[in-house]
Image (spheres, grey):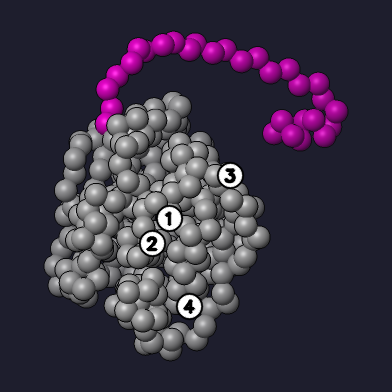
Amino acid sequence: MLGRWAKRGKKITIKLNFESRKNGTVISRNTILELKGATKPDEIVLIGGHSDSWDVGLGAIDNGGGVAAVRSAIISLAELARKYPSMAPKRTIRAVFWTAEEQGYFGSDQYFKDHKDEKIVFAGETDIGAFKPKSYNAILQYTGNKVGRSILDLATRNLNAVGIPLSISDSKIGGDIQLFSKHGVPCAYYISDQTNERYFPLHHTRGDYPSAFTPEDIDAVAAIYAAAAFHYAQTDHKFEELIDDTVTDHSSSEGDTPDELDELEQDRGGEEGSDEGAAKMRPIATIFKKFKTNHSSSSSSSSSSSSSSSSSSSSSSSSSNLRRDFGRRF
């Protein structure tokens, strides 16, 4: 309406009345789900997103969908380890849902202070809408050294091979993982579309509803973070090789063009003991294929151990075909 008036040359006067107030401080908590590593439990692969939201909407895009995807990723990896014991992660995989991001990263700042002395080998976050990638315009922003980049490259190529288009872009990372990035931890931040045309029209608005997502969206983002976490958890590179206080610039490279889906039946890897060998793809590729087809939504109870409680609940529920495959509820 205001736009039409402006086009007609009408003078528009807008008066705003704000009645802001300070309500004081309250206690809120980060929520942690953890899959303990089999051989290097003291080394941590971290994935997460913030659990709070802006007040006017339901918080599905920002950031309930991200929470649902990360939760689905770690639960799927736990089920993978149960069905294929040889695929149990060497390192601990930890999903953290940070509180009070909208007020100024209070949850992630406190988490970093409490855990900065841990051996964190990777940190990944989703907070720009958990939409499935439609093309190679979908990226993982990466900050870190070349060794860490090579692991993410491998994860991305394996995702490309099962039909998930994704590229890597070397760039500075903000958000809840920025403190880890500044301290040399390899970090990745998922952006489904560099134009953000699906995200910002609904961001911090009354239109931020779960209906913005499909189950396929949540499953695809879960697959991306499951793949990244799995590859960092299984790498034979030492902790000291992965962490570097000097962030190195790399030439930008896209992920491979997707191969034929019959490559799902091939092991993607080299000799035992190499990164590729540690990331044999037959079982996990089957899961990624399930992320792409025959989606069915349902709610599930958490099966991972939580080290802290939260007053926030996920506003979006992720579907999972793993229940049908594994014959049990999470």
Q: Find residue 202 and report its horizontal and vertical position in percent.
A: 53, 43
Instruction: Report if residue 213 is visible in the image.
Output: no
Callout 1 touching callout 4 (CB < 8 Å): no
- Secondary structure of residue under mark 2: loop
Pointer 3 residue: 172
Q: Earlier in the sequence, mark 3 or mark 1?
A: 3
Pointer 4 residue: 161
Callout 3 touching callout 1 (CB < 8 Å): no
Callout 2 touching callout 3 (CB < 8 Å): no
Task: Compute the Cα span from label 1 to label 4.
Answer: 27 Å
Q: Find residue 277 and report its horizontal and vertical position in percent.
A: 35, 77
Return the residue nearer the eye: 142 or 126. Answer: 142
Residue located 49% across and 72% down the image: 157
Q: Earlier in the sequence, mark 2 or mark 3?
A: 3
Task: Compute the Cα span from label 3 to label 1.
Answer: 20 Å
Which quadrant: the N terminus?
top right
Which quadrant: the C terminus?
bottom left
Q: Quadrant of residue 194?
A: bottom right
Type of residue at label 1?
Answer: Glu
Task: Compute the Cα span from label 2 to label 1.
Answer: 6 Å
Numbered range of the magenta stretch: 1-29
Pointer 1 residue: 241
Task: Compute the Cα span from label 2 to label 3.
Answer: 24 Å
Query: In the rendered view, would you say 259 is above or below 244?
Result: below
Q: Find residue 24 and report its horizontal and vertical position in percent.
A: 35, 12
Main SS of the magenta segment? loop
Pointer 2 residue: 237
Query: Which mark is nearer the camera, 4 or 2?
Result: 2
- Secondary structure of residue under mark 1: helix
Mark 1, residues whose alpha carbon is within 10 Å: few (<14), some, or many (≥20)?
A: few
